[in-house]
Amino acid sequence: MEACYIIHHEFSETIPWHFWSFVKSDNARFEGFPLRAEENMVAADKAFDFCSEVARKELVHYRRQKTFAFQEVLTRYAEAKVKTATDTYALLSKALTNIKQLDLNV
């Protein structure tokens, strides 16, 4: 592909030769730009899909761990409530027995 010169050809005699090599190399950088842009977009989409797939697996794992942790906390809470209720029942039974044994012959 022929390099596209930025400056009109009338001024080419006054411009040093290394400037033209810069213009040619700069334009060469953009050769096939739409094709490379599309390839980069496809590569980015593939990377995003891969990242999304990994993230999806991680989210499933995270939700499972969160559910197990919540289940464990609920189990401990229920066990603590049962223990508290059992202790309270024992104390109330003892208090009732003490009240029944009181001598009310005042």
Image (spheres, grey):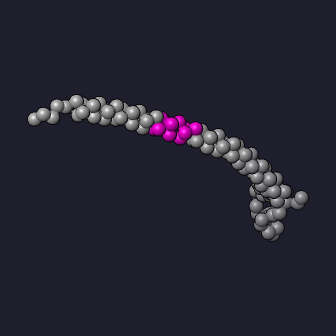
x 58%, y 38%: residue: 68
User: Does residue 1 appear in the picture of this structure?
Assistant: yes
Left or right: residue 52 compared with residue 74:
right
Left or right: residue 99 compared with residue 78:
left
x 82%, y 67%: residue: 9
Q: Quadrant of residue 3?
A: bottom right
What quarter of the picture does the N terminus occupy? bottom right
Question: Among all residues in the image, which is located at the extreme left?
Answer: 106
Decide: is 38 above or below 55: below
Q: Tell me where residue 25 appears, x and y as whole percent.
A: 80, 53
Q: Is residue 83 magenta?
A: no
Which segment is the magenta one?
68-78
Q: Tell me where residue 104 appears, x and y as whole percent.
A: 15, 35
Query: What secondary structure do most residues of the magenta stretch adopt?
Result: helix
Q: Is residue 74 magenta?
A: yes
Decide: is 82 above or below 10: above
Q: Tell me where residue 91 appears, x and y as whole percent.
A: 31, 32
